Amino acid sequence: MQIEDRVMDEQERIGFLLRSLYAEYGYSRYRMSKFEEYDLYSRNKDFLFSEGVITFTDTNGRLMALKPDVTLSIVKNTRDAAGTLQKMYYHENVYRVASAEDGFREMTQVGVECMGGVDRACVAEVLKLAAESLQACSPEYVLEISHLGMLEAFVDSISTDGKMREELLQCVVEKNRHGIHRILRENGAAEAAGEPLRELMGLYGNPKTVMPRIRALAEKNGTAEYADELGQAAAAFAGTGAEGRIRIDFSASGDVKYYNGIAFKGFISGIPGSVLSGGQYDRLMNRMGRKDRAIGFAVFLNMLERLTEGGRENA
Amino acid sequence: MLNIALPKGRLGEKVYSMFDRAGFPCPALMENSRKLIFDNEKAGVRYFWVKPSDVAIYVERGAADIGVAGKDILLEYRPEVYELLDLNVGKCRMAVAAPESFRDRPDRTLRVATKFSRIARDFYSSRGRDIDIIHLNGSIEIAPILGLSDVIVDIVETGTTLRENHLEVIETIVPISARLIANKSGFKFKTEQIEQLTEEIRKEVEEA
């Protein structure tokens, strides 16, 4: 007897569909407990999507938390695998603050994590899986890719001051090009110093159109190697049928304390925020005492709840 | 069709005239009527008036593709939106004001009355100052007069209300003006239309 589609809601259906997809690509299921020691999250607060964790004291007196995030637990509970590649997927509930007014919410995530000898082929595979995951949700999707190493180098060429860097990176996330000028003015720097970054922010769209200009800009700023990595990541989609859905966009950024290299976000027509988010997080691995590299992404299933009534109608 | 949320009131009317001059007119919008939504299919735009502080919510949640919101609202609520353009209208500043006789005593917790709790908290925490936030929804100026707070953090346009109540600006936190904002997902699927509109409005801003 087979499970019929009609007994599942949209979130469940897509969740199982994505699990089958990841299993087909050779990823194995990673299961974890709903709780984790609070200490893990308090040490990596900025990595979490939202502030606030539900805590409780266990029978042995230890302070525990209901998982607000999956990646941290996987990093903590797996071992260094340099030389090999661990490919895992998960389907878990997490507990986060949706907004100050809404309080905590239970959210369902499906995602993949690759840890160990992450090379360009692995990055390409994960990106392709991200595109296929979005396609499984709706054919009207966009996957945007950026390179945090390159973005950071452009920001560092303006300033290495922590606060100013943070503000500049926030402007990139907001596509706020006028804000770059304001920050430079307020910090007594010449507006011209921000021009390369402003130009980089303005280069978004189809890789075929924007990559030549990004490469030219990278040549001038000594980041040709990063542009090459970005170009290769985008080239992974050649002949897959997804080419038209891929965009280069540096606003698809992540916290540079944890992420580095390729970062990406996925959008579906009719759903207001990103439904997929991922990237390389070698820095998180490093902070947690691991020497190997990592890349992964998560699909936020709760955002797909309105897909049938909103997304597909609008698509 | 681009859905555009405009802030009700004088600022919204000023902003609409910029959109109008930029080639996105919808004359019905300025007529007195009970209609809430106004279309101009030919120009590919649909406007609606909303409460100024709600524009960012409409845009963040995708009910509007773009909208016009004050930087004060963006700083206070941090919506997940793109901030595409500074429209250079609705200019004012977020400032700290206090009674003319006010002398700060750093050994005491500073009581701050404001509608903008987050902006006030961020400003004082960047200086390591311990404060007590008193969140009010209006008539902020009255708080220090009645001894409810030591200072206020509020928007100051001309300073007339402050002067009339014997208050003065003691520090500017950040300059404020209206910004063109866009929904992140909407931007991906209506890129060309939003870019075209932004470009035309940019020209209007530069000419002004």
Image (cartoon, coloured by chain):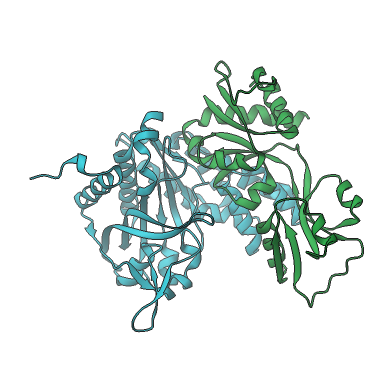
Chain colours: A cyan, B green
| Image location (x, y in percent) of residue A20 | 21, 48
| Image location (x, y in percent) of residue A180 | 67, 48
Q: Quadrant of residue A27?
A: bottom left
Between A209 and A77, the one nearer to me in the picture: A77
Residue drawn at the location 73% of the way across and 34% of the way down: B11
List the single residue furthest toward the top. Answer: B42
Compared across the picture, whether A42 is left or right of A123 comes to right
Between A294 and A49, the one nearer to me in the picture: A49
Residue drawn at the location 7% of the way across and 45% of the way down: A1
In the image, residue B202 sits, relative to residue B132, either above or below, namely above
List the single residue furthest toward the bottom. Answer: A60
In the image, residue B69 sits, relative to residue B33, either above or below, namely below
In the image, residue B93 sits, relative to residue A48, either above or below, namely above
| Image location (x, y in percent) of residue B172 | 80, 55
List the single residue furthest toward the left. Answer: A1
Q: Quadrant of residue B4?
A: top right
Compared across the picture, whether A112 is left or right of A164 comes to left
Q: Quadrant of residue A261?
A: bottom left
Q: Can residue B29 be seen by looking at this rendering?
A: yes
Q: Can residue A117 be seen by looking at this rendering?
A: no
In the image, residue A144 sits, relative to residue B25, either above or below, namely below
Between A179 and A65, the one nearer to me in the picture: A65
Residue drawn at the location 23% of the way across and 59% of the way down: A29
Compared across the picture, whether A127 is left or right of B22 comes to left
Q: Quadrant where the C terminus of chain A lies?
A: top left
Count of residue discs:
0
| Image location (x, y in percent) of residue A135 | 31, 38
